[in-house]
Image (cartoon, helix red, strand yellow):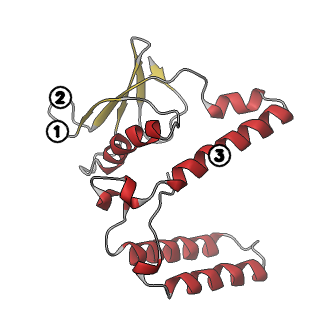
Amino acid sequence: KELSGGFANPAFLVNGKYVVRFHAVNDNSGDRFTRESILYPLFQNINIPAPQLITLDLSQELVPYHYIVITCLEGEALSSAWLKLSENSGSKLARQTGLILKEIHSLKSKDIPERLDLFKADENWKETFLKEFEESYEKFNLHNNDLEDEDRESIEETLDAYSNLDNDDLEVGLLHYD
């Protein structure tokens, strides 16, 4: 059965127990699914609801795409459930989501034993982050004129403050970005 609610990768429920997701963009990197395969067990170790990884196949031998097979988590997709919630229930769910994100953000580079490069946490991570942030901020400024000058100045001051720190002054942590 095809699952709806995903943003980038076609997903299918198999036998009511497993989810098979295909990497829709055939870019041969497989990085997204590889990151997920590393994070699912870490999330389970800190009591964050996460599926169990069954397999990750980047070979493209069975199908011409990368794919990942995971167990199906019980429940309803947040995107559809949110619309049915009362204001009070929505507030509680938003708080729970925030607490889960706080736990994810508490993971540090030392908690990721393998393939740290996939998380852009190598020795050049600060330069990579600053470049990506500056590019995103430029695009944002091109398309959004409704940001107050005071807010723009605050963003730029923060960027300047962090760009002057050495890599040794900062600890790498996880951020969700997709």
Image position of 114 with respect to 75: above or below: below
Q: Which numbered marker is on residue 7?
A: none
Amino acid type for the residue under numbered disc 3: Leu
Q: Residues within 10 Å of mark 2 (few under 14, many from 20)?
A: few
Res. 79 visible in picture = yes
> Secondary structure beneath disc 1?
loop
Q: Residue furthest top?
A: 15
In primary-sequence order, the first of circles 3 and 1 is: 1
What whole-number distance in Å separates the C-alpha atoms at marks 2 and 3? Answer: 39 Å
Query: What residue is shown at x 64% (from left), y 85% (from top)?
Result: 157
Query: What residue is shown at x 31% (from left), y 45% (from top)?
Result: 34
Q: Residues within 10 Å of mark 3 (few under 14, many from 20)?
A: few
Res. 176 visible in picture = no
Decide which of 117, 28 is in the foreground and name it.
Answer: 117
Image position of 51 with respect to 177: above or below: above
Q: What is the x, y in percent for residue 96?
A: 68, 40
Q: Which residue is mark 1?
A: 59
Q: Is residue 55 left or right of residue 119?
A: left
* Residues at marks 3 and 1 touching, judged by CB atoms closer than 8 Å: no
Q: Which residue is mark 2?
A: 62
Q: Which residue is mark 3?
A: 99
In primary-sequence order, the first of circles 2 and 3 is: 2
Q: What is the quadrant of residue 65 in the picture?
A: top left
> Secondary structure beneath disc 2?
loop
Q: Is residue 88 left or right of residue 140?
A: right
Q: What is the x, y in percent for residue 145?
A: 72, 74
* Residues at marks 2 and 3 touching, judged by CB atoms closer than 8 Å: no
Q: In this rendering, which labeled residue sits more in front, label 2 or label 3?
A: 3
Amino acid type for the residue under numbered disc 2: Leu
Q: What is the x, y in percent for residue 32?
A: 36, 48
Decide which of 3, 90 is in the foreground and name it.
Answer: 90
